[in-house]
Image (cartoon, rainbow, N blue to C red):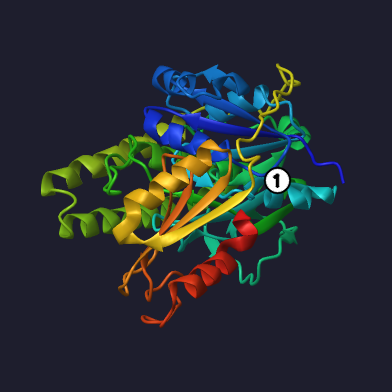
Amino acid sequence: MTQLQVSVVIVSRQRPEELTLCLKALARLSYPTYELIVVADPAGLKAVEQLPFSPMIKSVPFDEANIAAARNRGASQAAGEIVAFIDDDAQPETRWLDHLTAPFADPAVAAAGGHVLGRNGISLQWGGRIIDHRGHEQDLPLTGENATILTPPSGTAVKTEGTNMAVRRSVLAQMGGFDPAFKFYLDETDLNMRLGNMGVSTAIVPLAQVHHGYAASNTRRKDRAVRDLHQIAASRAVFLRKHCPELDHSPLLDADFDEQRTRVISQLVKGLLEPRDIRRLVKSWQTGIEDGRMRPLTHPWPLPAAQSDFLPFQPLSSGGVRIIKGFLANAAKLRAQAAAAVAEECSVSLFLFSRTTLYQTVRFHPDGYWEQAGGLWGKSARTDSLFSPWRLASRVNREMDRIGRSRF
């Protein structure tokens, strides 16, 4: 079967290091027909230029704090039949696009969303969910690894995350892309609601996995402490104006405020915030609501045809799969072996264990390989037993079975 051409759009602002890591992971996908489009500020564009594969990347200058407008700018350059989105602080598993695009073989499928893994690289951060006109989310009781195609009832939508989603370009263009009134937060949720109103289908694809690190931004610190609530509040007000009866706005916004207040007080108790931060954050919420009530709601004019030809990326993983394993005492030697295999364009997974029951973690290493580390007898999946008497070879085989279909 001929595989669809995919345009991958990455928006980045003030995070050149995270963008570089994201692109190194994207450069090693197994999918054969994709292009990379980076929409970034000057620091991000400079980071792209420093990569050896930069000639194979479409770079789009954009230095406004508006993720919806930036995504539209990237989509305008997308020449693929499918437009996929990933955040600059995320790294996709090797077979991400293979799985994410597979449901589009069904012409009724307009969009797809994958699973998002958290900071430890194993636990689920976001899975399949349904969202309603109030913006209230509900987990979907999906099991197994196969994709599920859903056409939700009126007034609801399948929730996808902007860091792991794809849309048919023709549908995205017809919808007018993302609404720039959502400068940050809920831009993809608004898109989900509009897809739901069209009556089209969305696929939830568990094996299309990305690792999401929650990098620092204008709204949060690296430790996830809240910096500002203005844009979150503004987007919430815009969302309700677009999708919810006006009589429900005030009680819903009151409930949202209580939720955010509980969040910041919890961070105060943990020592992440200081008492003086609370008044400032409350004020930023109030001004954000006022801002969101006044923002113009844009008319969804259709996006134009792609403004550039498809620029195929040649994946840097033509050397086959390489598995390297050993103990942390030999970490320097094993990491050097992994880096050498990357230089040979292998897709590399390194397993490093200590003789302990420490929990496992997974990360994409800056040298271009996947590294899983932790105790030989400890948990990887958080549902595992606290202690399991593994030997090195059997443990590695078990972990390869666990991650196999998303990576190999």
> Which percent across, then down, holds residue 390?
44, 79
Pick whichever, 224 or 101, lies toward us.
Answer: 101
From where the camera sits, is residue 255 visible?
yes
Please tell me in which quadrant of the rendered image residue 375 appears: bottom left
Q: Residue sitting at 56 percent across and 68 percent down?
A: 402
Name the amino acid, label 1.
Leu
> Which percent across, then down, holds residue 140?
61, 67
Q: Residue sitting at 46 percent across and 19 percent down?
A: 45
> Which percent across, then down, holds residue 134?
54, 54
Pick whichever, 322 or 365, lies toward us.
Answer: 322
Figure check: 59 above or below 341: above
Label 1 neighbourhood size at 10 Å, few (<14), some (14-19), many (20+)?
Answer: many
Pick whichever, 12 or 293, lies toward us.
Answer: 12
Please tell me in which quadrant of the rendered image residue 17 appears: top left
Q: Residue sitting at 45 percent across and 63 percent down?
A: 123
The quarter of the rendered structure image containing the C terminus is: bottom right
Q: Which residue is mark 1?
A: 195
- Is 403 positioned to the left or the right of 205 in the image? left
Q: Look at the numbered disc 1 and give the secondary structure of its residue.
A: helix
Figure check: 285 above or below 40: below
- Is 332 positioned to the left or the right of 169 in the image? left
Please tell me in which quadrant of the rendered image residue 15 appears: top left
